[in-house]
Amino acid sequence: MATTPPPLEDTLVRGYTRLSGRSARRRIDLELRLLDVLLALVLGLVSLPLVLAIAAATLLADGRPVLYRGERVGRAGRFFTIVKFRTLRVGAEERLGHLLGPELVAATLREHTRLGRWLKASQLDELPQLWNVLRGDMCLVGPRPIRPRFFSGLAHEIPAYWQRLVVRPGLTGLAQMRRGYETSMEEKLAHDLEWVADRSVPLYLRTLLSTAVRVLRQSLRR
C-alpha cells in the first residue's frame, strides 16, 4: 500500500528523509559508489582537455558565467547544487521560472545559445556533473535530479514519487534510455523505481553503455 507523502508545509528534507530513510542501504550501494568514484575519476581525467575547450568556447562565444548552477533534490530529500555548462542565454532561468510542461519545453528551446544547442544535443553540457558524482551528490546511474518546486508538486500528485529519493539522482537512468523527453512522469517514474528495486552492477554497466551509444548516435546525426 502506498505511503502518503508529508504535507506541503513540512520541508522536503524533514519529510522525505523520514520516508526514504526507512529503506536500508544495501551492499550494492557501496559497490556502485566505488564504481562511481573510479569511473568519474577516469572520465574526468580523460575529458579534461574537452572540458577546458568547451569552457573557453563558452566564454568567447557567450561570456560569463561559463557554468550553470541550480538547486536540485538529492537522496533523502537533501538539496544540492548541480553544475553544468551553461546552454541558455543569461537570465533565462528567471524568464522561464513560471512555466511548466510543453510551454516550458518550447520556451527553453528559444533560449538556447548556438553553442548551447550543440552541447545539449551531445549532452556534453553535463560533463561538469562528474564533480557532483565525486562529491557524492549524484551517481552515474539513477533517477534524473529534479528542481525542488517541481518535486514538491509531483510528490503530492503521484503518491509513490518520493521513492526516487531512496537512491542518489544520476547522470543517466533507465527512463532516459528507454523513453523520450515527452514521456509522462508516471512512465518515467516506473523506470526509476525499477532501478531503485533492481539496481545492480550489470544493470549499471548496461545503462552506461547504452548511454554512450545513444549519445554517439545523436552526435553523429547533428
Image: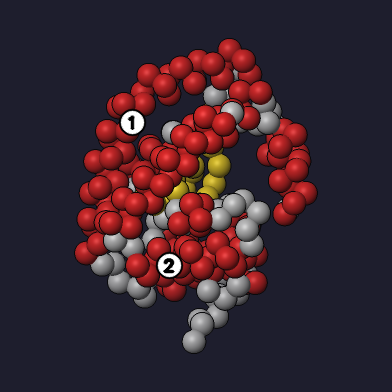
Q: Residues within 10 Å of mark 1 (few under 14, many from 20)?
A: some
Whether 21 is drawn above or below 49: the answer is below
| Image side of residue 50 versus residue 122, left or right | left
Q: Which residue is mark 1?
A: 44
On the image, numbered disc 2 is attached to which residue?
194
Q: Residue furthest top?
A: 60
Dot placed on the residue nearer the N-terminal end, 2 or 1: 1
> Image quarter for residue 184?
bottom right
What is the secondary structure assignment of the residue under circle 2?
A: helix
Q: Is residue 17 left or right of residue 71?
A: left
Q: Amino acid at mark 2?
A: Glu
Q: Residue 137 or 160: which is nearer the viewer?
A: 160
State the image coordinates of residue 108 (x, y, percent, origin top left): 71, 39
Vertical arrangement, residue 36 with respect to residue 154, above or below? above
Q: Position of residue 110 (x, y in %)?
A: 75, 34
Residue type (three-letter) at the residue carrying disc 1: Gly
Q: Position of residue 182 (x, y in %)?
A: 65, 54
Q: Residue at x 28, y 56 (%)?
A: 202
